[in-house]
Amino acid sequence: MTSFTILLGGDLVRTPLLERQVAGTRVIAADAGMAHAATLGLVPELWVGDFDSVPAHLPPALAAVPRQTFPAEKDKTDGELAIGTALERGATALVLAGAFGGARADHAFLHLALALRLAEAGTEIVLSSGAQEGIPLLPGKPRAFDYADGTLFSILGFSDLSGLSVEGAKWPLDEVEIAFGSSLTLSNEVKGGLRVTLGGGRAMLVAHPHPQSEG
């Protein structure tokens, strides 16, 4: 497995869990995402973008990172270009650090949707801000999570969902149908070992890791 961390321009805080996720990965920064390199103690192998939002006062080691420059008027975001470059370099697993929040809600939505598409194509992927993380759910592939009891989580549906089961939660579900846009799967809590099974549709689990999960 070849793992890459993509530094994106959203919110990010350094946590022990995120440190473990990025440890030993190759790193590519997308434009303003370079600001997170110092936070995480990383030096990317490449910096991708149109460089219209370059962080000020970069340490010399980060300012010297090789750049791949694109025009401002392009048909892909800096983040998508950085992800594409990682895939070209053999990435089979991705950590999208800084994928949530930030000034651009449209970019954050793209990161969620793109992550689902990549997961469906076989790429292992996690999105993280440190404070929260997203993991795509694939139909027919039950998924267990090692979050501590009390961890808040939601399941975001990007379509109608069928056969959704949630075990080890305060509010369990047993092969339910969820209409697109329903809030039924928001704001649940881990209770006894979370396991999620999706029969059909497109969905992502978004969790706010409890401090006990960080250890």
Image: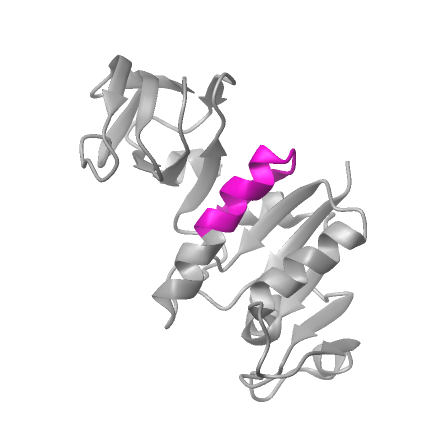
Q: Residue at x 52, y 49 (%)?
A: 114
Quadrant housing residue 120: top right
Q: Is residue 142 left or right of residue 68?
A: left
Residue 16, given in percent of the width and then of the height, sits at 52, 46
Image quadrant for the N terminus? top right
What residue range appears in magenta?
A: 112-128
Residue 133: where, in percent of width, then height? 44, 45
Quarter of the view holding residue 37: bottom right
- What residue do we see at 23% from left, 30% from top? 179
Q: Position of residue 72 (x, y in %)?
A: 58, 83
Q: Is residue 103 above or below residue 172?
A: below
Q: In this view, which residue lies farthest toward the front?
A: 75
Can the viewer see residue 97?
Answer: yes
The answer to which image quadrant residue 129 occupies is: bottom left
Q: From this viewpoint, is residue 11 visible?
A: no
| Residue at (65, 38) in percent of width and height | 123
User: Is 183 covered by the magenta stretch?
Assistant: no
Q: Residue at x 60, y 48 (%)?
A: 95
Q: Is residue 26 left or right of residue 135?
A: right
Count of marks overlaid on the render:
0
